[in-house]
Image: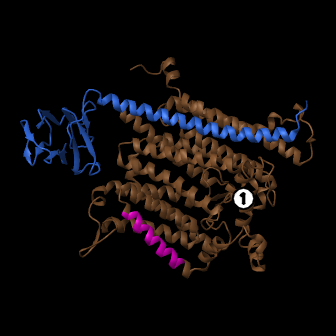
Chain colours: A brown, B blue
Amino acid sequence: MARQTPFNTIKRYRWQEFGLFIIPFMILLLAMTQLLLARSVRAGLIPTSSLSTKNLPTIQGLIPVLGIIIFFFAINFLLSFTFPRADQVLLPLVGLLSGIGVLMALRIGPNLFPPDPTLGTRQLFWVVLGLVTFLVTLFGLRRIEWLKNTYYIWAILGIFMVGITLAHSLRANLNSPTHDQLNIGPLNLQPSELLKIFLVIYFAAYLSKNLDEFAGDDFRIGSIHLPLPPAKILINLLIMLGLALLLFLGIRELGLALLIYGIFLCMIYLGSGKLRYVLSGLVIFFILGFIGYALFGYVRARFDVLGFDVVNWQKWSAADQDFAQNSGLQIVQGLLALSSGGIIGAGIGLGHPTFVPVVQSDMIFTALGEELGLAGLFAILGIYLLLIYRGFRIAMETTDTFSKLLASGLTSIFAIQTIIIIAGNMKILPLTGIPLPFLSYGGSSIIANYIIVGILLRISHNTVMEREGLA
Amino acid sequence: MPLSLDVFLLILRLLLIILLYLFLMQVVIAITRDLKRSAAVGSDEYKGTPIVGHLIVVDSGPSSLLPGTRFDLEPKTTIGRAPTSTIRLTDNFISSAHAFIENRHGTWFVRDIGSMYGTYVNNQPAKEAIPARPGDIVKIGFISFKLAQ
């Protein structure tokens, strides 16, 4: 077989990925231009009456976006030589999402209360660091089986990390919104972001090792069949799940508990293909949720906002007014921002997204809704859909059971996380502090998401290699 | 005519949204092309070799196969670890050329082709070609399959 001739390299270049990168980069450049123009209009630096080329932003203003573009093209170039046949659709989707994330951080930062002018630069730095982690994962993870054989190490490490955070946050103030962070020097780490990956590795490895038993008879007490997995498997899974859930309920992170439980149900379904396990899992979830609602005040407080009527604001009582300005402020302002966006949005830099508290991380969806409008939100949801579709496609194509479970489990993380936080923003579920993948500001989340993308691309590469008999 | 800045910003906004949807369209086209290509590869393999039966995994033994997995049987099917086998099984207890299944005038014949761990039809070793009917259990190495039409 001819190898590494110049012609071969050109033929095997990742042209599809290259082509798919072009429009995202145009979008980013366009949006950045719009942002800079809008900013000068807001500051009253240029007259709105007429446009002259002098008023167009200079090249310096576009540097953050150009930086991202150069990085992604460099990765496209590098992967063409090392992983020419790995999936070519995933990176453009991820690149556009991270680019919009950096752009929104650049846009929101200076308008925050108090202003945070370096927010965008920091987000850019995290994306670059994320891309480096992505490359390290992709190059380092030669054999996926290595993860399968060391799964308990990852599980223990994850639990240990969250345990430290828990101990730390129990000493600190439980009511502060960032109590799930671990502060090491200048870094604010969120170990839960890594824990979700470790949990998926654990579930995938455990299930793929015990598939036969898992596919066997249902859970039995005497002669009664319960719609639950076999006893031995169930106990092992529940120990891990219980630890994770307890930790998150301990630090009052309902959203993370929900995310972990959702991943658990997905993995159970993927491993067994039995819908009744998922249904009984949901029933148990509702029972537990009801108990939690009855027992804990902070759970009730989270649910309060769901029944709040925002549309008939003229009929608010004094108590409603008070609620809208205090505990319900975030949601109510978020909904106002979404509705003020309308169909095509106010335009980047022309809305007022910073009236929503914590808009840069938890509520980024409302900022996007205000400035890109419903049309823009649908496009972003479309990007997520395609990303998730592609992840499951990678899972479908592999032949190895562990890789299959791992890829589909990691993809479900994206799916569940996106659903939970968007539903929270739109007052369909209680709002919880989960980042929107790739769009929210936050270093740990971006790095964790890029690790996932790295693993997915590695699995896709290994599949192609195995199929063509090259490995 | 000088273009008002407001109009320019509006154009930028619309262009941004149009580009977002163009990108989505481009990705969808790329994905469908991928799907068509893999479907074409799949149909090429079966061209001229009709599928005349199936092997369904009943007991996957030590391998990582899922019980219930179906494998297509052609009139002449080789099973083994070698990439050239019609059905490729990558289990440690499968030899590179393990078994041969043939359909002669509607009757199935199973024959071991020099495997280490043997081939059995209903627990009878298939050293020579022995006949099998749909519903019979074909054991290849430590993996049991049900023969099905």
A227 is within the stretch colored magenta: no
**Where in the figure is residue A92, as x and y percent of width and height?**
59, 38
Q: Amino acid at mark 1?
A: Val
- Tell me the magenta residue range: A276-292
- Residue A48 falls in which quadrant of the image? top right
Q: Classify the position of the C terminus of chain A by image quarter.
A: top left
Q: Residue furthest bottom?
A: A295
The answer to whether residue A59 is above or below residue B148 is: above
Residue A434 visible (yes or no): no
Q: SS for tag 1? A: loop
**Where in the figure is residue A307, as x and y percent of width and height?**
64, 73
Residue A353 as seen in the image, left or right of residue B106 = right
Q: Classify the position of the N terminus of chain A by image quarter.
A: top left
- Residue A156 falls in which quadrant of the image? bottom left
Residue B96 as seen in the image, left or right of residue A207 = left
Q: Chain of mark 1?
A: A
Mark 1 neighbour class, 10 Å CA radius: few under 14, some 14 to 19, many 20 or more: many
The answer to whether residue A81 is above or below residue A124 is: above
- State the residue in front, A250 or A467: A467
Residue A400 as seen in the image, left or right of residue A171 = left
**Where in the figure is residue A90, as x and y percent of width and height?**
54, 40
Residue A350 visible (yes or no): yes
- Residue of label 1: A359
**Where in the figure is residue B96, as x and y percent of width and height?**
21, 35
